[in-house]
Image (cartoon, grey):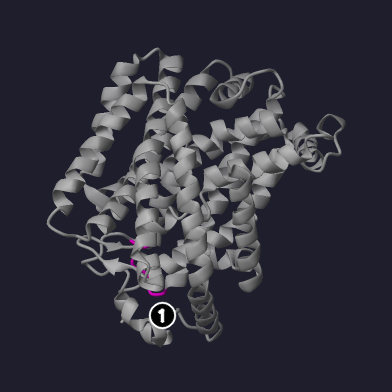
């Protein structure tokens, strides 16, 4: 099943890469320009409380999690150093899927109480007029990101802190549950503000650690990069029979880590106030690069420079051993703290994906508030339980629901992608004319009635 998913995501990515003329490569400069661009008067409207940058941080909070620490280690152990090369390839190809899905989320978003609301369930309903299809996606993402995935994140935090600091799992369970509920009961505005603080701090801190390792091992870096490339194509004798495994593991871990094409990030992307849907599509594309090309590469450098990747350790244990090799016993504690920030930010980001789709399922009716309260309390229970129990079955459920939601989303973006492509043409034309692009529903009159936020 995982192999089929890899193939579908890759084919979709290649298709949109061709149709957009490689926008994920040619418009990197525009992505950074937008990320640092001052907000327009429309984007600072008082009644809109989630900025484009905050929406970016919410999606990045969900992307950057245990997969960046434990997942990279597993990919290297099973697929060899060459798996990292194929993770990079998957990010470069798959990132265009994120551009398409996030642009569509902005195009078909609706107005909510505190922010806009949108995502695959909304663009499937408004663009394809297939609510039953949207319901399948909404249930799958609610179960995957909103519930089961958060049990995994909580379990990882608890295990890491118990190992590094001997903190009892019960204490971690209570602390995580309370902290999570305090944030999620504040809704998307509080989630966005917390993520805006945690995400830059954790990303820059981890990057600093990796840079220290890189400088300390600067003489080994050319050999490490050569090892990655040679192993990717089987030029290393030991990796000669592992090329297929390296490709599969690299693609699988890349998908799990950066979530490109799964349909998760569009839920965050839709909340932002921007003047043109393509702006948020481009910014979210940068999130894929940040996750895989930066954070995952940091972990790979730490592990490969240690030379411990073939010593029998795996997952987060290998990452801890590798960092301890470079900086001493403190490495285990540093990784545990990194996991706290990475996984906790994922918990609150994942929660919002569930909230967004639960609102879709209840249609904002009189049952929305009590159902939302029940969802938040259930989340607390699952975080508590996840911190105390083994989660092998939960991992199986995570994979199951991820396949369902991803297949639904890929079908949707392939059918609706023409609108994102038209918007990209409009954006490029306005930029060529020296304008700051602004989108109006009249640009696509065929769907003007379904894009009321742009009238």
The residue that label 1 is drawn on is: 438
Q: Is residue 13 left or right of residue 363?
A: right
- In which image quadrant can residue 364 be found? bottom left
- Residue at figure coordinates x 56%, y 21% from the top left: 317
- Residue at figure coordinates x 14%, y 47% from the top left: 370
Q: Position of residue 135 (x, y in %)?
A: 34, 57
- Residue at figure coordinates x 30%, y 74% from the top left: 41
Closer to the camera, 279 or 377?
377
Q: Position of residue 320 (x, y in %)?
A: 56, 22
Q: Position of residue 7 (x, y in %)?
A: 64, 52
Q: Is residue 46 left or right of residue 149?
A: left
Vertically, is 196 above or below 319?
below
Whether residue 422 is visible, yes or no, is yes
In magenta, the rendered stretch is 270-276
- Residue lying farthest to the left in this orientation: 366
Task: Residue 273: say if magenta.
Answer: yes
Vertically, is 122 above or below 424?
above
Whether residue 272 is visible, yes or no, is no
Graded by Cα atoms within 10 Å as few (under 14), some (14 to 19) or many (20 or more), the crowding at tag 1 reads: some
Q: Position of residue 205 (x, y in %)?
A: 49, 37
């Amino acid at each position: 099943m995982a192999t089929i998913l890899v193939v579908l995501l890759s084919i979709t990515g290649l298709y949109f890469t061709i149709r957009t003329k490689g926008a994920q490569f040619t418009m990197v400069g525009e992505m950074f320009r937008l990320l640092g661009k001052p907000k327009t008067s429309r984007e600072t409207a008082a009644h809109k409380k989630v900025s484009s940058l905050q929406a970016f941080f919410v999606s990045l909070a969900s992307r950057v999690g245990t997969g960046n620490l434990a997942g990279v280690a597993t990919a290297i152990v099973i697929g060899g150093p060459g798996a990292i090369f194929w993770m990079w390839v998957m990010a470069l190809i798959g990132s265009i899927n994120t551009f398409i899905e996030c642009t569509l989320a902005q195009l078909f978003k609706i107005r909510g109480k505190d922010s806009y609301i949108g995502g695959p369930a909304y663009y499937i309903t408004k663009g394809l007029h297939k609510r039953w299809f949207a319901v399948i996606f909404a249930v799958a993402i609610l179960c995957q990101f909103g519930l089961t995935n958060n049990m995994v994140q909580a379990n990882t935090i608890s295990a890491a802190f118990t190992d590094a600091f001997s903190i009892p799992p019960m204490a971690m369970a209570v602390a995580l549950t309370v902290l999570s509920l305090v944030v999620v009961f504040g809704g998307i505005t509080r989630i966005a503000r917390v993520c805006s603080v945690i995400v830059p701090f954790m990303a820059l801190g981890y990057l600093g650690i990796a840079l220290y390792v890189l400088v300390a091992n600067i003489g080994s870096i050319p050999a490490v990069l050569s090892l990655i490339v040679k192993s990717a194509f089987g030029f290393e004798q030991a990796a000669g029979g592992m090329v297929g495994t390296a490709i599969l593991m690299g693609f699988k871990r890349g998908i799990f880590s950066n979530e490109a094409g799964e349909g998760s990030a569009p839920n965050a992307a839709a909340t932002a106030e921007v003047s043109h849907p393509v702006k948020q599509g481009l910014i979210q594309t940068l999130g894929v690069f940040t996750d895989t090309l930066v954070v995952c590469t940091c972990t790979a450098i730490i592990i490969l420079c240690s030379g411990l990747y073939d010593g029998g350790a795996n997952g987060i244990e290998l990452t801890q051993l590798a960092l301890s090799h470079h900086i001493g016993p403190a490495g285990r504690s540093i990784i545990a703290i990194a996991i706290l920030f990475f996984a906790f930010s994922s918990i609150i980001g994942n929660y919002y994906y569930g909230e967004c789709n639960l609102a879709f399922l209840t249609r904002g009716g009189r049952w929305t508030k009590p159902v939302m309260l029940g969802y938040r309390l259930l989340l607390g229970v699952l975080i508590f339980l996840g911190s105390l129990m083994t989660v092998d079955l939960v991992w199986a459920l995570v994979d199951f629901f991820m396949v369902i939601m991803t297949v639904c989303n890929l079908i949707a973006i392939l059918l609706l992608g023409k609108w994102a492509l038209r918007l990209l043409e409009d954006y490029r034309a306005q930029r060529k004319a020296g304008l700051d692009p602004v989108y109006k529903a009249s640009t696509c009159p065929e769907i003007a009635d379904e894009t009321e936020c742009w009238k």
